Image: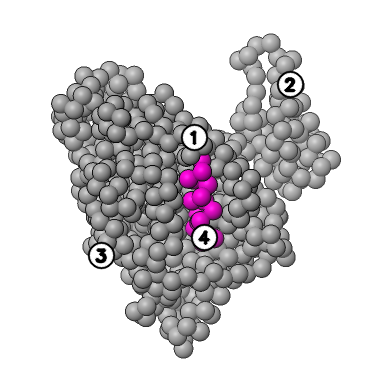
Amino acid sequence: MERVIQDIVSAIRAAGRPLDEAWLAKLIRRYNRGVRDVARHIGKQQLLAFYRTAKEEDGPLWQSWGIGTAEDRLILRSLTVKPRRTASGVATITVLTLPHPCSGACIYCPNDIRMPKSYLANEPACQRAERTFFDPYLQVRARLDLLESNGHVTDKIELIVLGGTWSDYAIPYQVWFISELFRALNDSDEEAGRVCTMRRTFYRDCGLDADPSVLAEQVRDLQERVDAGSCSYNQAVGELYGSAAWQDARTIQHASFEALDELQHVNENALRRVVGLCVETRPDLVDSRSAELMRRLGCTKIQIGIQSLDQETLDACGRHMAAGQIARAFAILRLFGFKILAHMMANLVGATPERDKRDYERLVRDPRFLPDEVKLYPCVLVESAALTHLYRQGLWHPYPEDVLVDVLAADVAATPAYVRISRMIRDISSGDIVAGNTRTNLRQMVDGQGKDAGSKIVEIRQREIATEDISADDLHLACIPYTTTVSEERFLQWVTADGAIAGFLRLSLPHRRGAAMIREVHIYGRVAGLGSSEEGGAQHIGLGRRLVEEACRQARAAGYHGIRVISSVGTRAYYRKLGFIDDGLYQMRTIGA
């Protein structure tokens, strides 16, 4: 491996920049061709580990390479595995809650009783959760270890909590779950190693198993009854997770708000800070009380399952809510300052391609809605979903591929510049899909059709600078105003001449006056360490501060005397430096008349 590292160093010195991914892959393949023992073949992860070990533990070898600070950064960037995972400016860690009875009854939802409602055991995040007994601490540490071993910077973490409907869980469990997320990030690696060992031992002593093959066999008969319709998902989950073993495990699954507050206070200055916390729930469960609770837990973004705004479609899918309830949820979440990530599905029961297009356009154009982000999925059928019966009766069928791509391409083209389409497929393996899209490159197909049609795509994800180099001199500040039923919104963005986006701020000016609200500040580009300034990247060159100052200026000009920010725990110190003071669930800055 020493020879390969030497070749990489020479190539970087000659180019003066990180290596092209294809060139590096070719170099690795050339090395591996000369090694007959497949077990000795190398990849980027092994090279990165070897490089770091030499840097930290082998002084003579490291000195012989003569690598300077700038070259070191370029080499680490070249060896980082899947660099786009932190290209948005933060490292994302996804965790799942324990399977729990669901208050909904949507016919398209999978009923895998090993997982929270709507998730499948074969999805990557679900596999990690099951292997760690759905323990939040163990899940975070497992994901953290993988990210860091692959070369990613993990000082800024966005936590995404999945598991169906967050508001269905008991409040003591919610507080414990979030507390453990913070604890896992606060603890040193040495302490975390001890906690992980003790926690796994505790669950095994309770009589629980984390082997997927064992668990699959244990639930086989019960799952067959659920699939046949002779037992409901809720009944099965109640039976499984109400067992004596799980009752024993749950004796540690509670925490106080006071303990959570202390853990959050520690995280403000921790090496790994939480810069975003997201949970998911249903619109009909959003009210002021639930919003206040989610904010107290530290949430900054809420995922809500919309799926459709068409009442006939909602009713046909067993999603018992009205568009008015969805609009009310948007209003409440916006006034509380949350970023709103809406889930929409095409090709549901009773839908048509044209109705789907109108439905999505309503979501992103009607002032009652207007999400900040969207997950736009086509409906697919898995065996355990109640939709199976309609499919077998010929009452639902998936769109042909060309029709599906056309619908999604029209949706993308209709998406405003202040909205980000986060995902377009679920991590459901093709083997689990009975009918519907199995293309893992669906988004690329949709993007290709949009380009062929000459559509001007302005949604955020298409414009992110990602891993590209950027200079502040290449950027100018632009503002996109839009109106909702409860506020005037200003989307402030740093963009290049061709529209690529390096950062943005969401400013909300409520109709009821009071204080203005900064709902999100995000700077793209490679993740730079806290307090560092990485050449070429957008992180830590003052873009965020200048956005905040512009937001204060615009709010003051609009007649507001104060401005709040829905800061995450890990950004509280940053906002204090910008003149904000702690003010209950938010931070506040007086801006005068």
Give the label, 4 or 2, closer to the camera.
4
Q: Nearer the viewer, mark 3 or mark 1?
A: 1
Comparing labels 4 and 1, the label whose residue is closer to the camera:
1
The residue beneath circle 3 is 288
Question: Looking at the rendering, which quadrant does residue 229 occupy?
Answer: top left
Q: Which residue is mark 2?
A: 31
Q: Is residue 339 visible?
A: no
Residue 401's mark?
Answer: 1
- Name which residue type carries label 4: Pro
Lower position in the chain sequence, tag 2 or tag 3: 2
Residue ID at (65%, 60%): 499
Element type where label 2 sits in the image: helix
Q: Which badge, 1 or 2, comes first in the chain's sequence?
A: 2
Q: Which residues are magenta?
A: 405-420
Kind of residue indicated by mark 2:
Tyr
In the rendered structure, which amino acid carries the disc numbered 3?
A: Ser
**Badge 4 vs badge 2, beta-carbon distance below 8 Å:** no
Q: Which residue is drawn at the image coordinates 56% and 75% (left, top)?
A: 550
Label 3 SS:
helix
Nearest to the observer: residue 246 or residue 113: 113
- Whole-percent x, y for residue 317 in the image: 27, 42
